[in-house]
C-alpha cells in the first residue's frame, strides 16, 4: 500500500531557461529564528539581525545542486545540497571573510539566472534545516597570464527535505521576506 498519493504528472515545458547562479546570499543559521514554508516556497523569514551577505559571482562560474539518496533496506531518504562558488582575485579581505565562512554554519540562498514569468530571478534556499558548511575549496594564483586568480569554495549540507524556493519578490530580492519588510543585504 502506498504511503503517499501522487498529485500530478509533468509535461515538456515549452519555454527555455538559463542555468547557473547570479548571486549567493549567506545567512548565519543561528540568526534565523523561523522560516514559514508553504507548498515548497518560503513566504516569511524572521532573523535576529535581519542581514544577508551577498556575494556576486562571475557569470558561468557557480552552481547549486542537490543529490537525493535513498535506501530501500533502511527506509530512508535524504538530500545533500552543494554550492560550488567561484570568486575571482585573491585579497586579504576575502581571505579573512572566507576564514569566517569556514567557521560559521550558514543557510545559503542562490539567486539563479533562470527567470520567473514576471522577469524576476528565481531564488532557492539550501541548508534550511541543518545548515551548510564550507568543507572544501582552493586558493589559486593561476600559472599563465590569462589564468584565473581567486578562490573556489564548496559548501555542502545534509537535509531531510529538498531545497525550497523563495516567494517571488516585489521589486528587489528579499523585499517581502521578513513579514513584508525588506531584509537588509550586506555587500561590498
Image (cartoon, grey):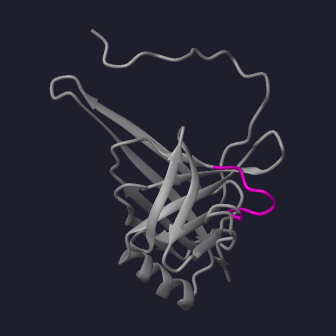
Quadrant in which the C terminus is drawn: bottom right
Secondary structure predominantly adopted by residues drawn in magenta: loop
Looking at the picture, how far across and down is residue 159, in whole percent? Answer: 35, 48
Relative depth, front residue between 55 and 46: 46
User: Quadrant of the rendered structure where residue 103 is?
Assistant: bottom left
Judge whether residue 169 is colored magenta.
yes
Q: Magenta stretch? A: 167-175
User: Quadrant of the rendered structure where residue 117 is?
Assistant: top right
Relative depth, front residue between 182 and 53: 182
Residue at x-position 54% and y-position 62%: 45
Residue at x-position 38% and y-position 75%: 104
Of all residues shown, which one is farthest toward the left? 73
User: Quadrant of the rendered structure where residue 86 is?
Assistant: bottom right
Looking at the picture, how far across and down is residue 144, in whole percent? Answer: 63, 71
133 over 126 or under it: above or below: below
Relative depth, front residue between 32 and 87: 32
Looking at the picture, how far across and down is residue 87, in whole percent? Answer: 60, 70
Judge whether residue 33 is colored magenta.
no
- Give the number of callouts: 0
Looking at the picture, how far across and down is residue 68, in whole percent? Answer: 38, 35
Residue 149 visible, this angle: no
Amino acid at each position: 500500500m502506498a504511503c503517499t498519493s501522487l498529485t500530478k504528472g509533468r509535461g515538456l515545458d515549452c519555454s527555455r531557461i538559463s542555468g547557473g547562479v547570479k548571486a549567493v546570499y549567506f545567512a548565519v543559521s543561528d540568526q534565523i529564528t523561523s522560516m514559514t514554508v508553504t507548498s515548497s516556497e518560503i513566504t516569511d523569514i524572521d532573523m535576529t539581525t535581519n542581514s544577508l551577505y551577498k556575494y556576486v559571482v562571475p557569470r558561468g562560474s557557480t552552481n547549486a545542486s542537490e543529490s537525493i539518496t535513498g535506501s530501500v533496506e533502511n527506509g530512508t531518504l535524504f538530500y545533500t545540497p552543494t554550492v560550488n562558488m567561484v570568486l575571482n582575485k585573491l585579497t586579504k579581505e576575502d581571505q579573512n571573510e572566507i576564514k569566517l565562512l569556514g567557521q560559521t554554519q550558514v543557510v545559503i540562498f542562490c539567486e539563479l539566472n533562470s527567470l520567473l514569468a514576471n522577469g524576476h530571478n528565481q531564488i532557492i534556499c539550501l541548508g534550511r534545516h541543518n545548515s551548510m558548511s564550507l568543507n572544501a575549496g582552493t586558493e589559486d594564483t593561476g600559472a599563465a597570464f590569462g589564468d584565473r586568480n581567486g578562490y573556489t569554495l564548496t559548501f555542502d549540507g545534509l537535509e531531510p527535505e529538498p531545497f525550497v524556493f523563495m516567494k517571488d519578490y516585489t521589486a528587489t530580492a528579499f523585499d517581502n521576506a521578513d513579514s513584508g519588510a525588506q531584509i537588509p543585504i550586506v555587500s561590498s
